[in-house]
């Protein structure tokens, strides 16, 4: 699997995904720490990829996303942006509904479907 295929798979499998330096418990930079804080305040679980221990992703993702910096927040397969955009959306009350709606959308999809009564 190429690095680009790995990135596409990660984005496809994780409705809320943060590419960051470090981990949510131990962010590797202030920008990643701020992004984690805003995302965590939304109250929904999210996946992350530590680009410090994945140098192939760290090298390829900026080209794939056409976004040069980390962190990068991906929601429902789309790049939302980096730290400044995440913080701005949070402060304007735009991040919370996006994260909640996405989490709800994917939690209901995993529910078993009840066949119609015949």
Image: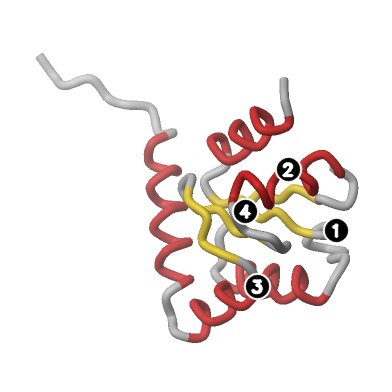
Q: Residue 60, labelled with which disc? A: 2
| Residues at marks 2 and 4, CA–CA distance in whole angstroms | 22 Å
| Residues at marks 2 and 1, CA–CA distance in whole angstroms | 17 Å
Say which of marks 2 and 1 sits in front: 2
User: Which residue is found at the position 73% from the left and 31% from the top?
Assistant: 3
Residue named by callout 4: 46
Q: Position of residue 80 (x, y in %)?
A: 51, 61
The 10 Å Cα crowd at callout 3, few under 14, some 14 to 19, many 20 or more, is many
The 10 Å Cα crowd at callout 4, few under 14, some 14 to 19, many 20 or more, is some
Answer with mark 2 or mark 4, whichever residue precedes in sequence: 4
Answer with mark 4 or mark 3, whichever residue precedes in sequence: 4
Q: Quadrant of the C terminus?
A: top left
Report helix, strand or loop for mark 1. loop
Q: Is residue 32 left or right of residue 79?
A: right
Answer with mark 3 or mark 1, whichever residue precedes in sequence: 1
Q: Is residue 107 above or below residue 70?
A: above
Q: Is residue 98 above or below residue 10?
A: below
Residue named by callout 1: 22
Say which of marks 3 and 2 sits in front: 2
Q: Is residue 101 left or right of residue 60?
A: left
Q: Position of residue 43 (x, y in %)?
A: 56, 66
| Residues at marks 3 and 1, CA–CA distance in whole angstroms | 14 Å
Q: Quadrant of the N terminus?
A: top right
Answer with mark 1 or mark 4, whichever residue precedes in sequence: 1
């Amino acid at each position: 699997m190429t690095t680009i295929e790995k990135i596409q798979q990660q984005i496809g499998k994780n409705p809320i995904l943060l590419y960051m330096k470090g981990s949510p418990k131990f962010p590797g930079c202030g920008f990643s720490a701020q992004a984690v804080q805003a995302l965590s305040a939304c109250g929904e679980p999210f996946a992350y990829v530590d680009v410090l221990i994945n140098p192939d992703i760290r090298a390829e993702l900026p080209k794939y996303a056409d976004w040069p910096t980390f962190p990068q927040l991906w929601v429902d397969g789309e790049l939302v942006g980096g730290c400044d955009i995440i913080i701005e959306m949070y402060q304007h009350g735009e991040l919370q509904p996006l994260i909640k709606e996405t989490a709800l959308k994917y939690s209901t999809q995993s529910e078993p479907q009840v066949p119609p009564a015949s």
